[in-house]
Amino acid sequence: MSREGLASAARSVDEVKTVVASLTDDEWSLPSGCVGWTVKDLVAHMSSNFKEVVEPSPPPSEPLDLPAERVMDLLVEPRKDWSNAEVRDEYLKYCDGAVGVLAALQDEPLASTVIPLADLGHYPMNQLADAFAFDHYCHLRIDLLQPTGPVARGLPAVDDDLVAPAVGWMLTGLPQMQPGLEQQLDGSIRLALLGAGGGSWRIARDGDAISITADAGPADVTVTSGAHDFVLWGTKRTEWRDACTIEGDAPIAEKFLDALNIV
């Protein structure tokens, strides 16, 4: 999925550039859809990540053993005292260079080199493009823009090429991001996602792990949702019960979906 992820991330970056350049002072201070962050904090999160991709900070004297979400907070916190223009300009300074780095990671030997991403698991470096495709799609289309975010702007309609890499990253990360999640899976689930970026996947327990396969065999229960909605409820931004229908052994799905929280 990674070259597709690169294309999706590049599209979202272009959209973010347009939006951040148009934000008013009042809009920068609005609470975003990412709990605890203003619009400025949200853009600072995206800009600080890209800065680290292009110009990594010196490593700490002692390795940090922190959850990924806390690491993201630590990058945002120093930028809270920055002006809106400084946050905007940092994003615009580094975004194209970061896309260039993600493009370089699609080629060997880097592409298949596996690296840890804090507590999120281990991934080949080419899949960082998928991670940023998800990150930008979610923060722009869900946390920043209406109807789920605070800012009103018009963007082109989503399509498979934009959404599928974001969904793909979520499903790639699901088996690794929550150690012990397999304990909440008492049977097999078919996840059927509709609309742009949709598809069908079978989620099942495999010993002490979770396996996810596309369109593979029958399942005990089917969970159906829109693909865009999956980005919302799969990350616990909204309640899955408001977006999903269940056919089959409902308790299997309910137990698993209540526990699911993709970062």
Image: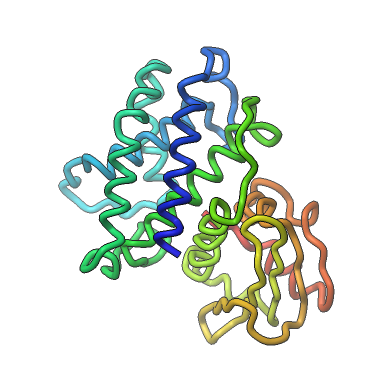
Vertical comparison of 200 with 62: above or below = below
The quarter of the displayed image where residue 60 is located: top left
Work out whether residue 79 or residue 7 is closer to the camera in this orientation and state it.
7
The quarter of the displayed image where residue 260 is located: bottom right
Estimate the x, y position of residue 167 in percent, counting from the top left: 57, 59
Vertical comparison of 203 with 225: above or below = below
Estimate the x, y position of residue 66 in percent, counting from the top left: 36, 52
Residue placed at 44% from the left, 30% from the top? 17
Horizontal relation, residue 238 to residue 122: left or right: right
Residue placed at 46% from the left, 21% from the top? 21
Horizontal relation, residue 70 to residue 103: left or right: right
Work out whether residue 76 or residue 170 is closer to the camera in this orientation and state it.
170
Residue placed at 64% from the left, 42% from the top? 157
Vertical comparison of 230 with 70: above or below = below
Estimate the x, y position of residue 84 in percent, counting from the top left: 42, 17
Estimate the x, y position of residue 8 in percent, counting from the top left: 48, 50
